[in-house]
Amino acid sequence: MSWLSRLKTARGSQSPLSEEAERALEAWHALTEPVHEHPHFESRYVVLNTEATGLDLERDRLLAVGAIAIDGGLLHPQDAYYAQLEPSPGDALASLLGFTGRCPLVVFNATFNRTLLERAFARQLGFTPEFLWIDLYFLLPSLFPERLERPGRLADWMAAFEIETFQRHHALGDAWAIAQLFLAAQSRALSLAVTNPRALADHAHAYRQKLKV
């Protein structure tokens, strides 16, 4: 079944996507498979964050998404995306894919953010896009044990690095803080010969396996 057929099946009697959203989806599906072994400074990362009605994955739902790009080792505040899902969740998610492309995604707490997003993609667009996910929840303590010995809250890491943002508990506001933490992680990783997106994801995964969580 084509992505367009899956989209129509998933949306059922819902309002059709806008033409802009359909173009974004068509363009995303036409992208070539990403190469995640390029050096950090030749890679574009997208820091992704969500807002939800709460923290219970069984009960709560996605409200908004925020994303900021880090390209060539630089944080670009103008290269950002924010959208509330209502009243057009399909359009918001399709446009998010238009922004992310197939870049590696940087999140804080992938268990929560990834689950919410993949559930919404499946429900609204009929498929679950595949990405390389880099979870700072595990990557940061693996690189900076002198700051926090074990995984901690985003607020703890912001305090450890004296990072502030323009609005806490806002998808884009927290994404801004997460992006700054990622720049620090990227710099420390280079000193440890962890030099590309795939290696970062593997490093975080190995640390999680070590914790057995």
Image (cartoon, helix red, strand yellow):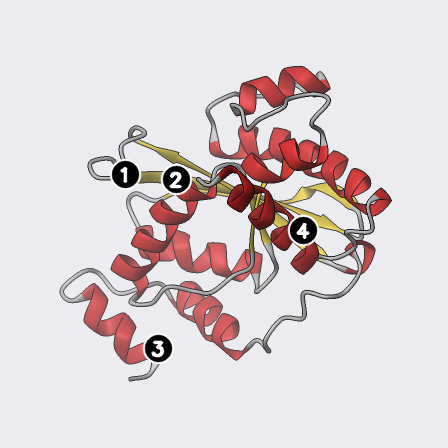
Image quadrant where one finds the C terminus? top left
The residue at the point 48 percent across, 75 percent down is 29
Residue tagged 1: 57
Q: Nearer the viewer, residue 94 or 196?
A: 196
When the figure is inspected, residue 182 is found, relative to residue 3, above or below; the finding is above
Q: Quadrant of residue 54?
A: top left
Q: Please state which amino acid type lies under the numbered disc 1.
A: Leu
The residue at the point 52 percent across, 79 percent down is 30
Residue 131: image x %, image y %?
Answer: 52, 61
Viewer-nearest of labels 1 and 3?
Answer: 1
* Spatial CA span between label 1 and label 2: 7 Å
Q: Secondary structure at mark 3?
A: helix
The residue at the point 46 percent across, 71 percent down is 23
Q: Residues within 10 Å of mark 3 (few under 14, many from 20)?
A: some
Q: Residues within 10 Å of mark 4 (few under 14, many from 20)?
A: many
Residue tagged 4: 200
Q: Quadrant of residue 1?
A: bottom left
First of labels 1, 4 by sequence position:
1
Residue tagged 2: 112
First of labels 4, 3 by sequence position:
3
* Spatial CA span between label 2 and label 4: 19 Å
Residue tagged 3: 3
First of labels 1, 3 by sequence position:
3
Q: Secondary structure at mark 4?
A: helix
Q: Residue furthest right?
A: 191
Tag 1–tag 2 contact (CB < 8 Å):
yes
Determine whether, in the image, residue 136 is placed left or right of residue 191: left
Q: Residues within 10 Å of mark 1 (few under 14, many from 20)?
A: some
